[in-house]
Amino acid sequence: MSEITSPMGGKVLDVKVNVGDTINEGDEVVILEAMKMELPVVADGSGTVKEVKCKKGDAVEADAVLIVLE
């Protein structure tokens, strides 16, 4: 099981995956807004989405777990 974390604090603009989705390394999974810029968060590995721990509009801290893969 692996986790995709936020590279910096910001606001979640969009969540691009749902539980059960299969994703590959490099796929965009979440779009964050940080310092008035859009920052895509990409998967650093492949797997199936087990849990989505954020939703649109959430404020997240750096290193917060956004997506859990299995």
Image (cartoon, rainbow, N blue to C red):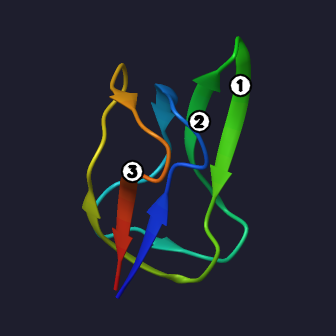
State the count of labels. 3
Dot placed on the residue nearer the N-terminal end, 2 or 1:
2
Neighbor class of circle 1 (other Cα within 10 Å; few <14, some 14-19, many 20+) is some
Residue that mark 3 sits on:
64
Q: Image point 33% across, 25% down: which residue?
A: 58
Q: Nearer the viewer, residue 69 or 63?
A: 63
Q: Are marks 2 and 1 in contact (CB under 8 Å)?
A: yes
Give percent across and percent down for residue 5: 48, 58
Residue 49 occupies quadrant = bottom left
Q: Is residue 62 above or below residue 68?
A: above
Tell me what residue is drawn at x 61 percent, y 49 percent. 7
Whether residue 64 sits left or right of residue 5 in the image: it is: left
Question: Mark 1 highlights which residue?
Answer: 38
- Tag 3 or tag 2, which sits nearer the N-term? 2
Q: Name the residue at 71% across, 25% down.
A: 38
Q: Secondary structure at mark 3?
A: loop
Q: Residue furthest top?
A: 36
Amino acid bearing label 2: Ile
| Residue count near mark 2 (Cα–Cα under 10 Å), binned few <14, some 14–19, many ≥20 | many
Q: Residue 69 location in percent, x, y?
A: 38, 77
Check disc 1 and give the amino acid type.
Glu
Real-space Cα separation, disc 3 to disc 1, in angstroms: 17 Å
Q: Is residue 66 above or below residue 40?
A: below
Image position of 51 with respect to 9: above or below? below
